[in-house]
Image (cartoon, rainbow, N blue to C red):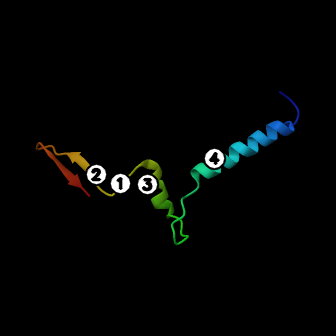
Amino acid sequence: MTGPASEDEAAAIAAAIACFEAATAPAQREDGVAPSPWQQAALIEGVGGKAFVEDTQGGSRWLS
């Protein structure tokens, strides 16, 4: 493929970028403040404030 992108191809690229930005933008809180970069990374990674783990002595416990 050579030459510049057609108008349709350029529009498709712009639409894909807009969808990506909308999907990855940090959510705004009601007070208009976005989560910190640390909070955003935790949300993306699925990290919670507490974790339920199996105890090596048997049973399970909360880990905070």
Dot 3 crowding, Cα within 10 Å, few <14, some 14–19, many 20+: few
The residues tagged by marks 3 and 1 sit, at their Cα atoms, a distance apart of 7 Å
State which mark lies toward you, 4 or 2.
4
Task: Report if the CB atoms under discs 3 and 1 are less than 8 Å apart.
Answer: no
Residue at image location 47% in from the left, 50% down from the top: 44
Residue that numbered label 2 is attached to: 51
Q: Choose top left, top right, bottom left or bottom right for residue 56.
A: top left
Task: Report if the CB atoms under discs 2 and 3 are less than 8 Å apart.
Answer: no
* Type of the residue with mark 4: Phe
Residue that numbered label 1 is attached to: 48
Q: Choose top left, top right, bottom left or bottom right for residue 7.
A: top right
Mark 1 secondary-structure assignment: loop
* Type of the residue with mark 1: Gly
The residues tagged by marks 2 and 3 sit, at their Cα atoms, a distance apart of 13 Å
Which residue of the protein is positioned furthest toward the top in this rendering?
Answer: 1
On the image, the x and y values in percent for residue 20 come to 63, 46
> Looking at the image, which is closer to me, 2 or 49?
49
Mark 3 secondary-structure assignment: helix
Task: Report if the CB atoms under discs 1 and 2 are less than 8 Å apart.
Answer: yes
Residue that numbered label 4 is attached to: 20
Q: Is residue 54 above or below residue 27?
A: above
On the image, the x and y values in percent for residue 38 come to 46, 60
**If the image is split into quadrants, where does the C terminus sit?**
bottom left
Left or right, 5 with respect to 63, comes to: right
Which disc is residue 42 wearing? 3
